[in-house]
């Protein structure tokens, strides 16, 4: 409450909380991933920009005009960071496309399924109780009330709905993300998806781990129909083949193929 979030720097907020939670202990787990969904609106994107898996990778903000930079749940303006989900519906709701938008969806998988990412959590109690999250935290209990109270405070910052015109309020969760991911060995932050009413999990992963250990192995393009009650995805195209670039998976080549009229009947619907 003492911070003017419009003006205060993330660095100062991070320093403040780091000092307040000194000595706090919390769980980490080693996670592997069958697949993480990531989506992007491509309504005004030229087709030639969609010929490599780079088009669905996390955005490289160094290549994007600063006027488009923004605060996000775990990342500062201009900070590269990967956001994905274990459920397509959560990914679509987080993206929040408009009616008649065109979107692409990519599924990211580990290059080696035996690789595990050491992960932190924000929203432990919510994830423990969630049947849609295959939690490694199921039997975890904090050893003391202080650690539990600190986690509840952190969780509240990750579960707060924030309007687009108040994105500066993300500074609190960004500061905690920096604290939780400060250790080089911690590569992933798992937290409940606000857009899915906390029913599913989001995964924030350091970009160097995505570049080194992941590939986008499937990509789909959908037309969006949206009303006040639901989002409908109508298949348009799919990656018939992805020619893998072993030197840089981000630059793997996509060979698109139009969905058949029969395929276009296989729509996906998500209630709002």
Image: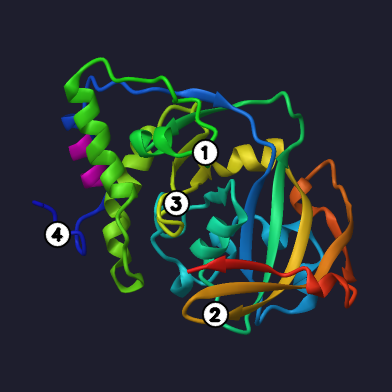
Alpha carbons under labels 4 and 2: distance apart: 32 Å
Q: Is residue 196 rendered magenta in the image?
A: no
Query: To which quarter of the image does residue 125 belong?
Result: top left
Q: Which residue is mark 4?
A: 4
Tag 1 or tag 2, which sits nearer the N-term?
Answer: 2
Between circles 3 and 1, the one closer to the viewer is 1
Task: Identify the mark at residue 98; answer none if there is no mark.
Answer: 2
Alpha carbons under labels 2 and 1: distance apart: 28 Å
Q: Answer whether labels 2 and 1 touch (C-beta < 8 Å).
A: no
Residue 95's x, y, as percent? 53, 66
Near-viewer residue (81 or 190): 190
- Considering the numbered disc 3 on the image, is that residue within a helix, a strand or a loop? loop
Query: Magenta segment, principal secondary structure?
Result: helix
Tag 2 or tag 3, which sits nearer the N-term?
Answer: 2
Alpha carbons under labels 4 and 3: distance apart: 26 Å
Residue 181's x, y, as percent? 42, 34
Please tell me how crowded label 4 is: few (under 14), some (14-19), or many (20+) other residues with Cα within 10 Å: few
Alpha carbons under labels 3 and 2: distance apart: 19 Å
């Amino acid at each position: 409450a003492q911070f003017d979030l419009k003006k205060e720097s993330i660095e100062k907020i991070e320093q403040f909380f780091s000092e307040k939670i000194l000595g706090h202990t919390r769980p980490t787990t080693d996670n592997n991933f069958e697949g993480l969904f990531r989506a992007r609106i491509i309504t005004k994107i030229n087709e030639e920009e969609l010929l490599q898996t780079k088009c669905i990778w996390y955005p490289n903000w160094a290549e994007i005009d600063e006027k488009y930079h923004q605060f996000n749940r775990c990342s500062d303006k201009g900070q590269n960071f990967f956001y994905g989900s274990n459920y397509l519906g959560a990914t679509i709701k987080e993206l929040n496309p408009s009616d008649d938008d065109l979107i692409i969806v990519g599924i990211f998988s580990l290059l080696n399924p035996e690789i595990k990412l050491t992960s932190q959590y924000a929203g432990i109690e919510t994830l423990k109780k969630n049947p849609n999250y295959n939690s490694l935290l199921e039997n975890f209990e904090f050893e003391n009330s202080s650690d539990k109270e600190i986690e509840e405070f952190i969780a509240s910052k990750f579960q707060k709905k924030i309007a687009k015109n108040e994105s500066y309020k993300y500074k609190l969760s960004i500061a905690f993300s920096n604290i939780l991911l400060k250790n080089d060995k911690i590569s992933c932050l798992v937290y409940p998806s606000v857009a899915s009413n906390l029913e599913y999990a989001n995964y924030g992963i350091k970009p160097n781990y995505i570049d080194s250990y992941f590939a986008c192995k499937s990509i789909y393009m959908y037309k969006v129909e949206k009303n006040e009650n639901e989002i409908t995805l109508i298949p348009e195209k799919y990656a018939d083949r992805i020619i893998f670039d072993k030197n840089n998976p981000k630059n793997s080549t996509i060979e698109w193929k139009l969905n058949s009229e029969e395929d276009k009947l296989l729509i996906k619907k998500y209630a709002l």
